[in-house]
Amino acid sequence: MSRPHPTPVLIMNITFQRAQPDENFSIMRFESEDGRCEVGLSPVLFGVRVRAGDVGSMAVDIDYCAGADVLFQLQLLDVIKRIIETFPTGTPMRDIAAQLPTYERRPINQDPCWPALQQLLSERTGEKAAFQAGIEQMLGGESPASERDCCPNCGGTIVGDGYQSVRHCENADSEVYFHAEPDSDTVLCKPAEPHEIHEEVKLTAREIGRLRHALDDSRNLPSAYEILSDHGLMERTPNGFVSLDPQVIETRIRRLLGPTT
């Protein structure tokens, strides 16, 4: 009498679906169908991070700096999401993170980590990183639009999900957006006055050195804030400096240094 063949066990890979943003992923969030893990976009002081971890955990296992470029944020999210989806359901996120490349320069499109991630995606799926198709799929057929996630006035991040809190520029007046209904129009900051560099402005050797040091690595940009503020190129508040897009800061540094840069 022959023994019955065992029923094969079908092992499914992780599959993400669009989910409502929360306080940890306030820009965009995806949750696995089994409800165990999540991946999405999280705003930080200078740009946005692509992060992934277990649902409900305050910690994340995957954390990549995507900078302030909205298109790259979506490209990086698409690649990370698709890499995770090549692993079987139930794979601990820390085990997936251990197989991903690390980085030193931020945002990571300035680091060898970015091409390494694309290569990893290609090796695990047999496909190249088809960014536009992947992004449109994530957005439900919408085309990515930079004005949706970046303030047109200052380049700051638009935060809030439109469900629990109104979408607003991170530099907007809190008295305005705090009392607004969640589904109200996006609250923007007050447009800054045009900045002009006057020919009579002279920089000291120390200032020039600090500005050039800031341009060498985006992580050094804060060292230029005080100098930019002294020359009317950055607004100072009692609590610090008004946040600007790193690319805006670099442009103003170059304008201050002049044609030599």
Image (cartoon, rainbow, N blue to C red):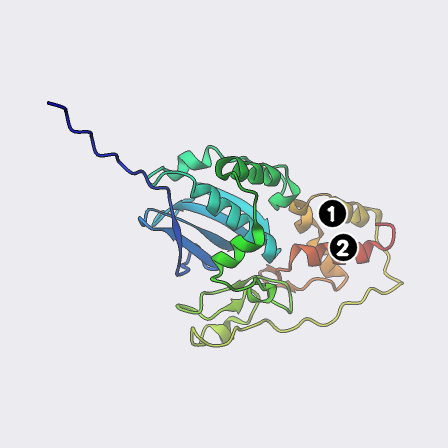
Which picture quadrant has residue 112?
Answer: top right
One can see residue 73 in this view: no
Image height check: is 127 above or below 190? above
Q: Residue at x 64, y 58 (%)?
A: 245
Which residue lies most toward the front here? 1
Q: Which residue is mark 2?
A: 253
One can see residue 66 in this view: yes
Q: Residues within 10 Å of mark 1 (few under 14, many from 20)?
A: some
Q: Residues within 10 Å of mark 2 (few under 14, many from 20)?
A: many
Q: Amino acid at mark 2?
A: Ile
Which picture quadrant has residue 17?
Answer: bottom left
Which residue lies most toward the right here? 200
Q: Residue at x 40, y 38 (%)?
A: 87
Which residue lies most toward the left here? 1
From the top left corner, tell me how far across and down residue 164 is, in percent: 39, 68
Q: Which residue is mark 1?
A: 215
Image height check: is 62 above or below 2? below
Q: Residue at x 75, y 57 (%)?
A: 251
Mark 1 and mark 2 residues within 8 Å of each other at the beta carbon: yes
Which is more toward the observer, 152 or 132? 132
